[in-house]
Amino acid sequence: MNITITPTEQTGISRRLQISVPTETVVSYEDQAAKKYASQVTIPGFRVGKAPPSMVRKRFADAIRQEAVELIINEAFKEAVEREGLKLASQPHVHDLKAEPGQPLEFVLHCELRPELSLQTIDGFTITRRDAVVDEEGVEGQIERLREQKADWSPVDEKAAPGDMVNVVLSIAEADGSIPEGRDYRLVLGGGQAIAAIEELIMEAAPGQTIERTVRWPDDFPDESQRGTSKMARVTVKDVKRKALPALDDAFAREIGDFDTLDALRDAVRADMGEQAKRDSVAEVRGQLVEKIVEANPFDVPGSWVNQLIDGYMQMYGVPDAEKQRFAMEFRPMAERQVRRDLIVDTLAERESLTASAADVDTRIEEMAAARNVDPGQVYAQLQKAGRLQEIERELTEDRVFAWLLERNPVSA
């Protein structure tokens, strides 16, 4: 394609290219678009495809021009990427488009490139491993959480207290001072489901009673526009339920699962927490390695990849639209760390031939099947249906990469 490409900016992984397409090339693309329109459109007095080209170009001038411009941009983009040897991280953006009739077509192509990591310094780091210790206080805390899950809620004919579950009708005054019809809410007081002032109002009312007064929103309320504001609130307490925890005995253990005694349940909880502590310790060691590698080998990450990861988490967590901006700001540092980690793993896996093979995946599936005492083919089919085979391959590759790194970096307790 006859175009002129002039690089205008090269910053990190960002590139800006000034693209200029001569007038004769633009005209040739307009001719192509006009022929396409002439073969498809219907003009009164002519059969489809038989209208004079000049009439077609006159009647559909804007549409023909638009289609020609889109074709030129797409072709010019491909040509520029090939000529400049760019490895793109995402779809480029077009800026400053100039597409006047009878003039050359010009625009700026903003490209974000895939980072190319050299990772020259990857050893000699000192890593500290945290002991995977499970204390009895933690075990008892987990047992208490299990009791909470099995708690019974019984109605009480008295004002609510922290920890009680209430069913209320709540109304908050509008900006003009009017109080709309209330909405039903079921809350556990003290659980952070409502602001403290609303909970205090609820605890002033007995079941069946309605109370209203002005309440103040806290200064750290997530919605900045509401911080420190005062509004009239009306609450009707419909009922109050109080929690009764089950007795901590062998019967409770049997209700939780296949445990004959409370001691057996404690042993199982202790073992599970021990395994989780080991996983957390491994994750911390890997996190330290990634941080030290990034510090010794700084590199930029594509913002589009970070945004894509943030969007994926927002969909997974069902973040409401009103909270998306705040979530994105808070989650961005974590997303950037994840992208850097993935790039390091991918680079070392390719460079050191550490990528898990199909045979490695098959071996892991056989191990999973043996642990469940089922046929490996059944496990494979389940993982394939759930789209998790790539996840297994990724986990194995990460294990091999970090094992390779730990051979070169001492870990101290």
Image (cartoon, grey):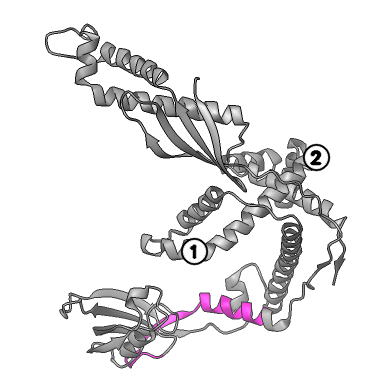
Q: Quadrant of residue 7?
A: top right
The vertical placement of 329 against 376, above or below, is below
Residue 329: mark in rendering = 1
The label nearer to you, 1 versus 2, is 1
Q: Is residue 358 magenta?
A: no
Tell me the crowding category of disc 2: few under 14, some 14 to 19, or many 20 or more residues within 10 angstroms, Cα based.
few
What is the magenta range? 139-161
Residue 353: mark in rendering = 2
Question: Disc 1 on helix, strand or loop?
Answer: helix
Q: Position of residue 128 (x, y in %)?
A: 81, 69
Q: Quadrant of residue 387?
A: top right
- Screen quadrant of the C terminus: bottom right
Residue 161: mark in rendering = none
Disc 1 and disc 2: Cα gap in Å? 36 Å
Q: Residue furthest left?
A: 45
Q: Position of residue 358 (x, y in %)?
A: 73, 36
Name the amino acid, label 2.
Ser
**Is 337 or 236 nearer to us in this picture?**
337
Q: Position of residue 125 (x, y in %)?
A: 83, 62
Q: Quadrant of residue 153?
A: bottom left
Quick check: can you spot residue 239?
yes
Residue at the location (44% across, 86% down)?
Answer: 163
